[in-house]
């Protein structure tokens, strides 16, 4: 089971390996942009990523250690999509902005994400699929 912190750590490692500097990496109890990374290219590029896990990381939760059900997955994917769309709606001036969502690579998350795939592509939102072994498949229209 991947906790949200596992997903965040794996994505941050992938980004660092591709030349990004991590400016912000939140824990599961913090609110805000889960991952903020920057890459110095001809035009500075900031990447905001909303991450979700596949089980609760709170030991006092009834869901702790159990996979989220389909309704919970749908809510998590919806929240991540909303956050990415909200990031793309902010005014950043002359800084290039990219948004992404990071999800556990499992059947439930794939099924829900597939239903919004056309609009995700249209908006240019990347999906970081984090596998159990922490390998990552990035689906996006832009290069890391």
Image (cartoon, helix red, strand yellow):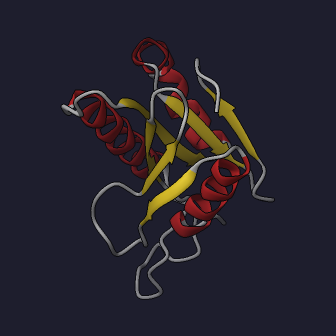
Q: Quadrant of residue 48?
A: top left
Q: Farthest residue toward the left?
A: 91
Q: Quadrant of residue 111?
A: top right
Residue 92: image x %, image y %?
24, 34
**Relative to 52, does residue 59 appear above or below in the rendering?**
below
Q: In the image, 96: left or right of 21?
A: left
**In which quadrant is the C terminus drawn?**
top right
Q: Residue at x 35, y 36 (%)?
A: 84
**Relative to 52, does residue 40 appear above or below in the rendering?**
above
**Relative to 70, does residue 121 appear above or below in the rendering?**
above
Q: Farthest residue toward the bottom?
A: 60
Residue 57: image x %, image y %?
49, 76
Q: Residue at x 61, y 64 (%)?
A: 9
Q: Quadrant of residue 96?
A: top left
98 or 72, which lies in front? 98
Q: In the image, 65: left or right of 23?
A: right
112 or 82, which lies in front? 82
């Amino acid at each position: 089971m991947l906790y949200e912190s596992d997903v965040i750590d794996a994505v941050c490692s992938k980004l660092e390996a591709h030349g990004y500097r991590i400016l912000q990496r939140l824990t599961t109890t913090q609110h805000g942009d889960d991952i903020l990374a920057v890459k110095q290219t001809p035009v500075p590029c900031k990447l905001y990523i909303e991450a979700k896990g596949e089980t609760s990381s709170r030991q006092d939760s009834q869901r702790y250690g159990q996979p989220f059900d389909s309704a919970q997955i749908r809510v998590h994917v919806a929240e991540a999509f909303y956050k990415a769309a909200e990031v793309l709606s902010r005014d950043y001036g002359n800084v290039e902005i990219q948004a992404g969502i990071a999800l556990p690579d499992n059947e439930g998350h794939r099924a829900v994400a597939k239903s919004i795939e056309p609009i995700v592509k249209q908006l240019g939102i990347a999906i970081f699929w984090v596998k159990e072994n922490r390998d990552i498949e990035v689906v996006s229209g832009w290069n890391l």
